[in-house]
Amino acid sequence: MRNPTLILVSAITLTLAASRAAAGRSPKALHYYAADGSVALPDYRKWVFLGTGLGMQYIEQAKPNPPFTTVFAEPWAYDEFMKHGVWPNKTILVAEMRKSVANLSINKTGYAEVGDPVGVEVEIKDSAKGGWMFYDVATETNTAKPLPQRMACYSCHAEHAAVDNTFVQFYPTLIETAKRKATYQDR
């Protein structure tokens, strides 16, 4: 005769294990959308670090103390990229910009990030919305509406992105995977 308690405990254990496994891989982009089409800023600092650039901008104009731009990807999307060399649908990438300062504390020659973010941008791959969408996050509300398609970010990414509308050429941890999967374009 089967022990009903043992069967119940086994079923609960399997269900919890399956839920934990799915939670790490499930696309959550829809979770961040509000009814008005805006996006709520996710807790991205717990995500996978892709890279940091210093003073990266679209125009050729040097700035003193250029900002740092750090890019993060959701862990499940990163894992899928590492398997296939392209971002899966519902991928969310977040770019955070912070001020830089020189001569901070004992530092005499380089720059360090300081203060609160001066800007946060979100890029979401969503086939239901026509592909990649860009959002400029208002730091006071942590929400954003999609940027109009006429904004420079759309054409710049389309013309210069090394992989799937993203600047993988600036993320050393992704370049080799993209080259191995033949999804990388030198740009």
Image (cartoon, rainbow, N blue to C red):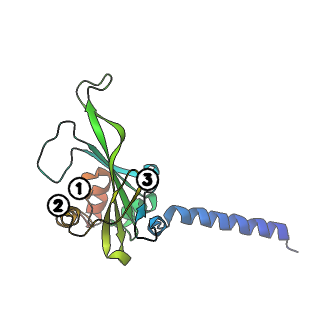
Circle 2 crowding by C-alpha within 10 Å: few under 14, some 14–19, many from 20: few
The numbered disc on residue 44 is 3
Q: Residue sitting at 29 percent across and 52 percent down?
A: 171
Q: Secondary structure at mark 1?
A: helix
- Residue 118 position in % (x across, y down): 32, 45
Give the left or right position of residue 86, taking residue 21 as reference: left
Q: Residue sitting at 25 percent across and 52 percent down?
A: 170
- Residue 12 picture quarter: bottom right
Q: Earlier in the sequence, mark 3 or mark 1?
A: 3
Mark 3: amino acid: Tyr
Give the left or right position of residue 1, taking residue 107 as reference: right
The foreground one among 59 and 178 is 59
Q: Does the CB distance between marks 1 and 2 fall below 8 Å?
A: yes
The numbered disc on residue 186 is 2
Give the left or right position of residue 19, taking residue 159 as reference: right
Mark 1: amino acid: Gln
Residue highlighted by disc 1: 169
Q: In the image as oriented, which residue stretches furthest toward the left?
A: 60
Q: CA distance from mark 3 to mark 1?
A: 21 Å
Could you tell me which quadrant the N terminus lies in?
bottom right
Q: In the image as oriented, which residue stretches furthest toward the top?
A: 106
- Residue 131 picture quarter: bottom left
Q: Nearer the viewer, mark 3 or mark 2?
A: 3
Could you tell me which quadrant the C terminus lies in?
bottom left
Q: Secondary structure at mark 3?
A: helix
Q: Does the CB distance between marks 3 and 1 fall below 8 Å?
A: no
